[in-house]
Amino acid sequence: MSTKVAVVTGSNKGIGLAIVRALCQKFQGDVVLTARDESRGQEAVKELEKENLHPKFHPLDVSDHESVVKLRDFLQRQYQGLDVLVNNAGIAYQKDAGFSFAEEVEGTCKVNFFAPLDVCTVLSPLLRPHARVVNVSSMASQVCLTRCSESLQNRFTDPALSMDELVALMNSFVQSAKDGTTESLGFPANSYFTSKLGTTVMSMIQQREMDKARGVETDIIVNACCPGFVSTDMTKHKGRLTPDQGAETPVYLALLPPGTTSPRGKFIREKEISPWDPHAHIPLPSVAK
């Protein structure tokens, strides 16, 4: 029998590194730490080895399709499959970075939406029965939904929305930033919030597509989640939670036991299903990100 394997994207620091740490402790198989920069990735592995943990390393730039393909080929060759995929890699532009709104939107959506979609598309054929896919999103996706126009709210909550239609919506957001039509099209003028809106809806569609293509009985589960307001470089270390605390919900989803019927294709906060409804009351929890 092949060794089980878990992959965490963007995991040389912050929440990603904490997810790798927890999986090394709890997952019955190999854990692959990935990073764009090989030296930083290897340093992260050494850091965990000091804790008597032993992750593997593989370079991965989620925005580079060929890099994703190389990871797929490695997993196929080494493990003949994939059991856990945590799409953690993400970006949030700082307001004082000097980028135009159009540049910020294009860059943010590339990393936070289009890249994890590509990773899932390339790696999904490797998913074995009982595999778990976790797309790290944010409660910003829920807030964004409430700020969209009613027409867009209806689109983003449509249970029949296809992946192609979602991609078209996200492309229209990127183009609107270039054209200066973002708000007139019904999108909020926030690149990070909207990119995470796409991530959450993507996860729901992926579960439907997986059930249709592979069958519910294969027990492959996809969920999106909010890790909470975590002290990381992305939050300028203003978060209230440690990275290890932020890893708790993603790791909970990554280790859902075989035969789990819920959550499946949902948005999870604090290990609980959170409503995907623009009219639902969304409290600001202790782990809000």
Image (tube, helix red, strand yellow):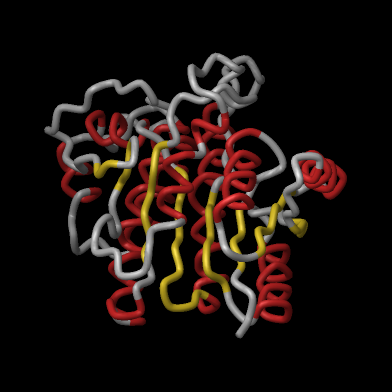
Furthest-right residue in this view: 39
Furthest-left residue in this view: 279
Residue 44 position within the rendered picture, expressed as x and y whole percent measured from the top left: 78, 42
In the foreground, 269 or 202 = 269
Residue at position x 33%, y 29% from top? 188
Tell me the quarter of the picture where residue 232 sits.
top right
Furthest-front residue in this view: 52
Residue 221 position within the rendered picture, expressed as x and y whole percent measured from the top left: 36, 64
Q: Tell me if residue 250 can be seen.
A: yes
Residue 156 position within the rendered picture, expressed as x and y whole percent measured from the top left: 25, 48
Tell me the quarter of the picture where residue 51 sits.
top right
Tell me the quarter of the picture where residue 261 sits.
bottom left
Residue at position x 53%, y 54% from top? 86
Q: Is residue 108 above or below residue 133?
A: above
Furthest-bottom residue in this view: 1
Quarter of the picture holding the N terminus: bottom right
Q: Tell me if residue 168 can be seen.
A: no
Residue at position x 84%, y 41% from top? 43
Quarter of the picture holding the C terminus: top left
Residue 81 position within the rendered picture, expressed as x and y whole percent measured from the top left: 59, 78
Counting the numbered discs, the total is 0
Q: Is residue 9 above or below residue 147?
A: below
In the foreground, 241 or 9 = 241
Residue at position x 18%, y 59% from top? 159
User: Relative to residue 90, is residue 249 drawn left or right?
Assistant: left
